[in-house]
Amino acid sequence: MSTDLTFRLWLLALLIGAFVTVQGCNEKPLESPRETARAQSGQEAFAPVTVQHQLGTTVIDRAPQRVVALDMNEVDFLDQLGVPVAGMPKDFIPHFLSSYKDAPGVEDLGAIVQPNLERVHRARPDLILITSLQANHYRELSEMAPTIHFDVDYRDSETRHIEVIRDHLLTLGRIFGKENLAGQKALELDAKVEEARRITEGRPEKALVVLHNNGAFSSFGVQSRYGFIFNALGVKSASPMAEAGLHGQPVSSEFIQQANPDIIYVVDRTAVMERRAVMDVQSMGNPLLRQTNAWKNGRVIFVDAQAWYVTGASPASLKRVIEDVIKGYQG
């Protein structure tokens, strides 16, 4: 065989080998039907979640990508789970959620008690989260996207308040594929509740929860917005009344003096609504309150008003409420 022929055969073999190599590099590995479907949809495989709530039954049949939360408690749930918020009311944002106020991509949907439905529609949600404060809009919202009502009772939290919060957290964990994280957060909440119960158990102190509003006071007892403090956390009530309702029972300074609580938890609504600093012992110059055991022993606790008044039914806010309750027993 001539040298020229040998060289030609060698060159041909080299070209064929190079072609085969290039073709092999361009081929993709075999994919399972599930991986192929996932690649085409851009989402993990999603198992539908059915949620029964006080306003009906909501079926989530695909992984939500644009979530609207119309209550600050719902914003906190999403924040705890690391789920992006597409839109929310921005009229009263608690300090522990302040990063959302000017966050790019988070639409301002108006007010908590009166959301702007046109803005909600423009936000193109595929899941909407509401509470009783927006329940009158449920039908309209459900026409825009699947809507879930958080069944927390803002008027009477005496029973199942903690359980309802815990259940909602775990439900959202299922919807967003965050079951492990939601379970971890639920256990943290359980531990915080147990910590409070260990501290209050067997203690003789009696407490009042009062809301301050421009110099006037309302009291909250065992069947009220803050009933869970007495039921779930084991605090003893100093009030002889069953102050039911969202806004409590208006009471006088004389009433507080005569009840003579060992601990007073003051929720400064005025500070929230007028966006100013929470009052303290120096600014509360009430001579009758100064005669109570609570005042004399340094157990008037000016609580985190935003956690207590704006939220109070979410993981982060509930932890802050419990921390304030514990302060009352530390003197």
Image (spheres, helix red, strand yellow):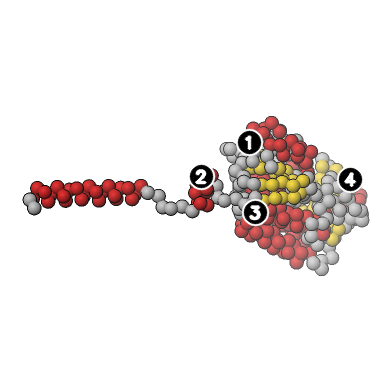
Residue 61 in the image, given as x and y percentages of width and height: 64, 46
User: Which residue is situated farthest in the left direction here?
Assistant: 2
Q: Which mark is residue 40?
A: 2
Residue 214 in the image, given as x and y percentages of width and height: 82, 40
> Of 241 and 12, which appears nearest the observer?
12
Q: Amino acid at mark 4?
A: Pro
Disc 4 or disc 2, which is closer to the eye? 2
Q: Amino acid at mark 3?
A: Arg
Determine which quarter of the picture holds residue 88. top right
Q: Earlier in the sequence, mark 1 or mark 4?
A: 1
Label 3 element class: helix
Q: Amino acid at mark 1?
A: Arg
Distance from Cα at disc 1 to Cα at disc 4: 43 Å
Distance from Cα at disc 3 to Cα at disc 1: 22 Å
User: Which residue is situated farthest in the front direction here?
Assistant: 1
| Residue linked to disc 4 | 250
Label 1 element class: loop
